[in-house]
Image (tube, helix red, strand yellow):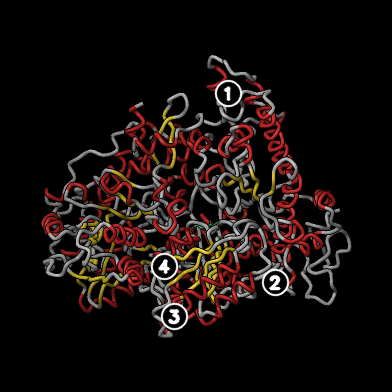
Amino acid sequence: MTQLFSEIGTADVSTVVAGASGSPAAAQPGPLSPFVARHLGPTEQDAEAMLAALGYASLEELIEATVPSAIRLQQALDLPQGLDEAAALAQLRSLAAQNQVWRSYLGLGYANTLTPAVIQRNVLENPGWYTQYTPYQPEISQGRLEALLNFQTLVTDLTGMEIANASLLDEGTAAAETMTLAFNARKQKDAKTFWVSAACHPQTIDVVKTRALPLGIAVMVGDHRSFSFDTPVFGVLLQYPATDGAVYDYEDFIAAAHGANALVTVAADLLSLTLLRPPGEFGADVVVGNTQRFGVPLGFGGPHAAFFATRNAFARKLPGRLVGVSKDTYDNPALRLTLQTREQHIRRDAATSNICTAQVLLAIMAAMYAVYHGPEGLRAIGDRIHHHTLALASALTAAGFDLGQEPVFDTLRVGVGDLQSDILTRAADHRINLRALDSETLIVALDETVTEADLQDLITVFTGSTPPLSHSPTPSLPHLPSPLQRTTPYLTHPTFHRYHSETEMLRYLYRLQNKDLSLATAMIPLGSCTMKLNATAEMVPVTWPEFGQIHPFAPAEQTAGYRKLFSDLETWLGEITGFDGVSLQPNAGAQGEYTGLLVIREYHQQRGEHHRNVCLIPQSAHGTNPASAVMAGMKVVPVACDEDGNIDVADLQAKAEKHGEKLAALMVTYPSTHGVFEAGIAEICAIVHDHGGQVYMDGANMNAQVGLCRPADFGADVCHLNLHKTFCIPHGGGGPGVGPIGVKAHLAPYLPGHGLVAGVGGDQSVGAVTSAPWGSASILPISWMYIAMMGGAGLKRATEVAILNANYIAQRLAGHYDILYTGQNGRVAHECILDVRPFKKSADIGVEDVAKRLIDYGFHPPTMSWPVAGTLMVEPTESESKAELDRFCDAMIAIREEIRAIETGQADRDHNLLKHAPHTAADLVSDWDRPYSREQAVFPTPFTRSAKFWPAVNRIDQAYGDRNLICSCAGMENY
Ligand SMILES: *Cc1c(COP(=O)(O)O)cnc(C)c1O
């Protein structure tokens, strides 16, 4: 019966769903792997029924009616046959086995860490956490918002600052963001130089340089002990402890910087701040860094959560997400994302940054690590590492090595002279990685996993013999002098003191998890975000040690498995998009946009066309597009959309002509952000090319294209993919993400490289855009597994079913709601927009009321007010079953009837089911004076009666939280 989705031994499918094109002459789509039926929601019978409802005899007919034939891919994707879960895992196991897990003491801002098992299993490996979406609907996101508030508190307390955001993509990016903040806030408008200490991690310096270039900022690298501010600089960046381990006292330098009107950023190791005086106490304006060593695996470079802490004065200039305390309708404290007016989705090209997806899941892990250990536990970890470092220092000094005179926390700079190659040979014999700073100096950085046996091995490696380790070593390095010692308390809030037993911790994690609606609860039909299945088999490899326990700068010989995985993915994504070159480096879609535009910029520069700096962006574009264009040094010129939501081709033509010589690029989303396959896409690309511009395609909607058409074939020069949308990496409650870009051959030389690792990117690379050479390497196995299990035929089928599901919803809801935009033959692509604007007038009901009422029915609301204000955008994805789609449609139809009751006067205009939504358990026990029943409020359907998802709080007052900014745990007590 299941010819549609289960294993078919032949491509000759004669029933409702024909093969690739139904034509025997076309390339044959091979058999579908059994995994395909598990990835897809609808069964064959379901699909038949849905197609019948739409009036098509086959899936192929629907696709023909929906996707413009001019851009249809004529052949099957050239990808390996799909595998079942076991076979794909076995193949990936053999790749993983080619990675070697050595002990890495390489430092550079990455450290081995002991992920508490209770956090690994119950957060990192738990779909209740990792399948959550970004907390735009705070009433059903209180759990992760509380975890993120803990993260912000952790960061502000340890850094000694006043306010911290809820995670950035990595330390290099955070440093680049602080440069932008300092540049925009500079007092001397002619100061165009950012001064960076040479003691910063080299990859951070590289990422900052890449970011500075298009903004016209000069980066000056120097030594803080000799720089005297004779050149006007608007900001400085210091590292604490320095990349070679030295802990400098920066107080005088910072005073001098302030005297010269420069803002000061300190890139700090958060764990060291348990012992070291925090930068907030010696004058830092901003503190950035990485929280990886708070229990987040190395993962060959990522994903990890970076942080950004500053003074309250800069709260409105912060990049990224910020969680704040507000209140709900009963004045109970309630959390939400605050000051969103800084962000790209509202401010567009005037945003403080282009951050959309950040690193929420990893920030939650780091916060939970701190909650579990508490301040004493963290201090003990810091102390132990520090004492191990001093013990090693004594032994090495006794053996005659020169360790310099600077105090250290966990990293030693060892002068080894001509012994270096002997030492490195012995290190290799012990499967130990050390960092060579130059030909006579080695760096060894310790971490919480280091045991006494490890110390013995290190001594053997350095000295060639095995002297006993002294348990009470005479320190050869100065102990931390008192001006460098921390004296102030941190993490005094009860949250960091209550959950130190595993039982309490487990229950805390589940208590928070249960407040949040994830894919483990119900469909999350968010337009443009593609909340599809994150299959467990795809997730399992992430925590294999061969992927998780590898330092980003481990030598190439130890990472052959990873490199094969990268090249597989680059090849497959290249085939799927039609592009010639792929970079896996960008850590999110928005970073892909920035990277792609840098590549375009470089292309124009290399051709001597420096003047090309105008970026055309349709009005309907995602906010990250204009924000990224600004970061790439471009000037944003909006292009109008017509009344069907398509790009206004006449306006595009006029703007392209007007800016002719200056035209750098068009950014276009396909299918459009209105969820439509624009028939004019090839013409649109041609217009831009005719005027010397390049076409950047925002590939967030790739879920509507895979296997059916390819961006490179219809005119795009660059495109990013969101692997956390189309290719099954989970959203993690707002990150991680991966935003690789594909480019045509003429742009491939400029793909991002890496200063520390050879062989990455093109030979005329734009530089590094992230700290790690392959960005978030450890989650790439997820997308590898997805493609390996689906195969070319399965991927194409997934796209077709995504389109089927969206059209089925549109069809069922038509007549109840207006479907705002449709393409040829009245069909939508993989998502559809429901117009609820008319209800404002007819019933005083806004989009928010409908969204919150949907929560009462047990659903996550669709995307609100984007790309059209006052509407809902629904994207079901291929993974949702017909039963779930029907349940959703039934809920939407029932809500329409509730609105109708207001329209007809049956229900009160002010006190009705929508205005008071979402309803909580607290509502039920309050004095019930509503003109509707408790049952209607919380059990509107039989399903909700049997499986109720309760929102944790009532409707949250959005404005109150912005006016009364409170962004750490302490604020919760003020209520
Ligand atoms: C999600 C999305 C982006 C941004 O991707 P992130 O990974 O969140 O940075 C850009 N454009 C569109 C249309 C999107 O849906």
**Is 483 placed left or right of 432 in the picture?**
left
- What amino acid does circle 2 point to? Ile
Q: Nearer the viewer, mark 2 or mark 4?
A: 4
Residue type beneath disc 4: Lys
Q: In 3D space, how far apart are the residues under numbered discs 2 and 4 (Cα atoms)?
A: 30 Å
Image location of residue 195, percent across then percent down: 22, 66
Q: Which of 216 and 208 is in front in this view?
A: 216
Q: Where is residue 614 in the image (x, y as percent from the top left)?
A: 44, 71
Q: Quadrant of the C terminus?
A: top left
Residue under circle 1? Answer: 911
Residue positioned 33% across, 75% down in the render:
425
Give the CA distance from mark 4 to mark 1. Answer: 48 Å
Q: Quadrant of residue 452?
A: bottom left
Q: Which residue matches tag 4?
A: 635
Secondary element at image label 2: helix
> Residue at coordinates 56% horizontally, 60% vertically from top-left?
723
Kindly report the distance in space between the C-alpha atoms of the residues bearing marks 3 and 4. 15 Å
Residue type at the position of mark 1: His
Decide: few, some or many residues near mark 4? Use Cα within 10 Å; few <14, some 14-19, many ≥20: some
Residue on which the image places disc 3: 604
Q: Residues within 10 Å of mark 1 (few under 14, many from 20)?
A: some
